[in-house]
Image: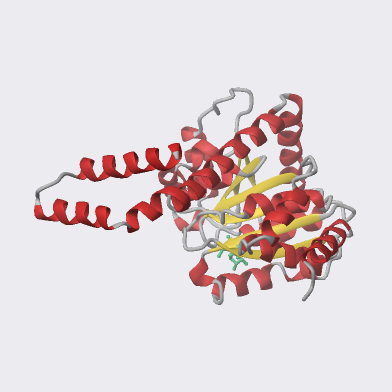
């Protein structure tokens, strides 16, 4: 058997050498939460301060996110190490989305400074896989300069992108009624910048007007979200896009927002991890007990209340904790 210590040593060295094969393997270990190995790996990768800039890109399916990423990355300095993670709806993992991304971002696959990976969102549509936080940290440990995370923005869960990104970019296209989607999905609250893509199509001006009308100054008050209009498939106005990203990065640094955002992200992520562990350690076993089954039976029979069942569980947890 391959000793675990050797395996961790090999992983650490491989990641630090930016060996893409090893990085891919490490991501799988984190994504699948392989027992022991993922914990040991996390210990390694968190022993570094995160300097990697995280750009979150979200928007409706087909808005042109992948095309934009290809154009953006091709305009960036080729000396920069860039990791691209696209979060796919799990039901599309073997289908169109992945294939589409591969075609759209094809020119990037052969570039030595770019690493591309798709991750499943585990069925949370628009959501972000929980291990994404670890994956970003992994890129940090590998001394990557930038990580781009692409998620599909519909529903509510895409708000998660705001919990991991330093800059949130919301991409929309005039063709698809995206503006309504953006308003409905609460993306206005999290966007640091809006990209209106496909300006070759009709309706871009109207979309810009709508965004301006509804734009709120963000809570920290110092940064007003910017609107950038591009045509990603022709790489038009990429210079403005790059400049706006740079402006936001500078703003974050000058106002100590990188630190504040990351601290908030970390707090939320740790909170979720605690809830997960608490649930499997304390709540789930009680739900398996006969006494809880009896409560369920009584509720259905109308002889006990919902709250009594909850109190029963809470009391049992208290007893467990005191033990
Ligand atoms: N007319 C026009 N089409 C574009 C432009 N940018 C991208 N497209 C096309 O829009 C379609 C969707 O592009 P993608 O980059 O795959 O969009 P996406 O947002 O990544 O899509 P999902 O990953 O499925 O959510 C493709 O057919 C692109 O060629 C543009 O500026 N103008
Ligand atoms: Mg895409």
The image quadrant of residue 20 is bottom right
Picture coordinates of residue 286, whole percent (x, y): 35, 52
Q: In this rendering, does residue 64 appear at all?
A: yes
If the picture is divided into quarters, which one holds ligand 1? bottom right
Q: Please state which of residues 56 and 206 is positioned toward the viewer in this rendering.
A: 56
Picture coordinates of residue 86, whole percent (x, y): 63, 60
Picture coordinates of residue 57, whole percent (x, y): 62, 50
| Quadrant holding the N terminus | bottom right
Residue at 77% over, 69% down: 109
Residue at 81% over, 62% down: 5
Picture coordinates of residue 242, whole percent (x, y): 75, 45
Residue at 62% over, 44% down: 164
- Say above or below: 124 vs 146: below
| Identity of the residue furthest to the left in this view | 302
Q: Please state which of residues 139 and 205 is positioned toward the viewer in this rendering.
A: 139
Q: Please state which of residues 183 and 293 is positioned toward the viewer in this rendering.
A: 293
**In the rendered view, does 42 fall on the left or right side of 81?**
left
| Quadrant holding the C terminus | top left
Q: In this rendering, does residue 146 appear at all?
A: no
- Say above or below: 277 vs 4: above
- Say above or below: 48 vs 97: above
- According to the image, what is the colour scheme of the structure? secondary structure
Residue at 48% over, 45% down: 275
């Amino acid at each position: 058997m391959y000793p675990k210590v050797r395996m961790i040593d090999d992983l650490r060295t491989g990641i630090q050498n930016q060996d893409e094969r090893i990085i891919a393997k490490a991501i799988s270990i984190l994504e699948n939460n392989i027992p022991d190995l993922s914990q040991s790996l996390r210990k390694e990768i968190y022993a570094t301060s995160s300097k990697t800039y995280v750009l979150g890109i979200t928007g409706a399916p087909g808005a042109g996110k992948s095309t934009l990423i290809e154009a953006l990355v091709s305009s960036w300095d080729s000396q920069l190490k860039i990791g691209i993670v696209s979060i796919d709806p799990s039901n599309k993992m073997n289908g169109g989305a992945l294939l589409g991304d591969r075609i759209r971002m094809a020119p990037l696959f052969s570039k030595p400074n770019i690493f591309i990976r798709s991750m499943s969102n585990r069925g949370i549509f628009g959501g972000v896989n929980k291990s994404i936080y670890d994956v970003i940290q992994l890129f940090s440990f590998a001394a990557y300069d930038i990580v781009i995370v692409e998620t599909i923005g519909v529903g509510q869960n895409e708000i998660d992108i705001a919990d991991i990104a330093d800059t949130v970019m919301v991409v929309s296209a005039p063709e698809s009624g995206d503006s309504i989607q953006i308003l409905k999905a609460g993306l206005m609250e999290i966007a640091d910048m809006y990209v209106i893509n496909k300006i070759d199509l009709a309706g871009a001006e109207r979309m810009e007007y709508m965004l301006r009308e509804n734009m709120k100054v963000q809570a920290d008050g110092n940064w007003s979200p910017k609107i950038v209009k591009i045509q990603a498939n022709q790489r038009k106005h990429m210079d403005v896009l790059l400049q706006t990203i740079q402006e936001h990065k500078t703003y974050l640094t000058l106002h100590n927002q990188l630190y504040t955002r990351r601290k908030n992200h970390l707090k939320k992520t740790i909170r979720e991890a605690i809830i997960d562990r608490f649930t499997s350690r304390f709540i789930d076993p009680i739900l398996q007990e006969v006494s809880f089954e009896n409560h369920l039976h009584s509720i259905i029979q109308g002889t006990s209340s919902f709250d009594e069942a909850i109190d029963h569980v809470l009391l049992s947890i208290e007893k467990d904790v005191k033990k």
